[in-house]
Image (spheres, rainbow, N blue to C red):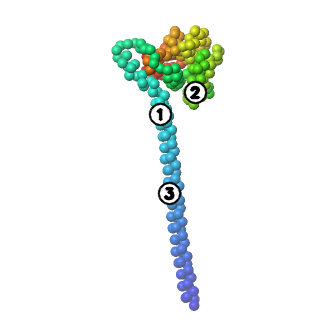
Amino acid sequence: MKSRLLTYSIFILVAASLVSCVSKKKYIRLEKSSVDTVATLSREKLQLQMLNDSLKRSLVLKDSMIDSLSFKLNEASVKKDKDKGRTTVVAKKSTLSKEQEYEKKSLFLYNFTKLIEWPIEYNGTEFVIGVVGDEQWIKQLQGFMAQKKVSGKKIIVEKYKKGARYNVVYVPTSEMGSFSVVKNAVKKTKALLVTDDAAPGTHISFMLDQDKVRYMVDKVAIEKAGMKVGQELMRYSG
């Protein structure tokens, strides 16, 4: 009887041990599977984040390429003129509509904001452009700049007010009669002065040439006013 009980007890212990081993192995497999699943999800999450960052960079690059399109379109003709030994470009009568002219000049003005290094006193939260007089120009520029920023700063376009502080002051052709007054005021505020005519004291002046808008840069005057000119800005001047 005692022998049977001993045999039975040993059987129970062996069975329990086997069950315990099986359960432990199953637990280990489940734990390993769980760890592998977490690792896989982490890798997939990282890959998605990298893809998202890559897409964002691509969009920024695409936007930059679009913003620079007008510069690229002018390059061939400007190079041709320089190869012939010309120092200036003789503009031909414009074939642009007013809307097209506004659009091209708006794009150039936006590029100017990125290709000039501004004085440290302009490190505020907004980048302000003052337009002298022309209400139609103001509305056009406000619409164009609405969703754009410069180094994270919101771009504000408003009618020029004497004594106000601006990063850029733009004087259209219709307001060149007040240029001298505006020029003297701008000297005190270190703003970039942009006009439609190459009047003395202008930092950057536009000119129309058939279906193109070109510009001339006075690098010396800009740097004298406390700003620095980027190489790309000079590259397309002419």
| Label drawn at residue 134 | none
From what the image shows, is residue 223 above or below residue 51?
above
| Label drawn at residue 143 | 2
Label 2 residue SS: helix
Q: Is residue 198 visible?
A: yes
Q: Which tag is nearer the camera, tag 2 or tag 3?
A: 2
Crowding at label 2, few (<14), some or many (≥20) Cα neighbours within 10 Å? Answer: few
Q: Which tag is nearer the camera, tag 3 or tag 1?
A: 1
User: On the rendered structure, is 18 left or right of 86?
Assistant: right
Crowding at label 1, few (<14), some or many (≥20) Cα neighbours within 10 Å? Answer: few
Horizontal and vertical percent position of residue 161:
64, 16
- Rendered image quadrant of residue 163: top right
Quadrant holding the N terminus: bottom right
Between discs 3 and 1, the one toward the N terminus = 3
- Rendered image quadrant of residue 189: top right
Residue at point 46%, 27% (across, down): 68
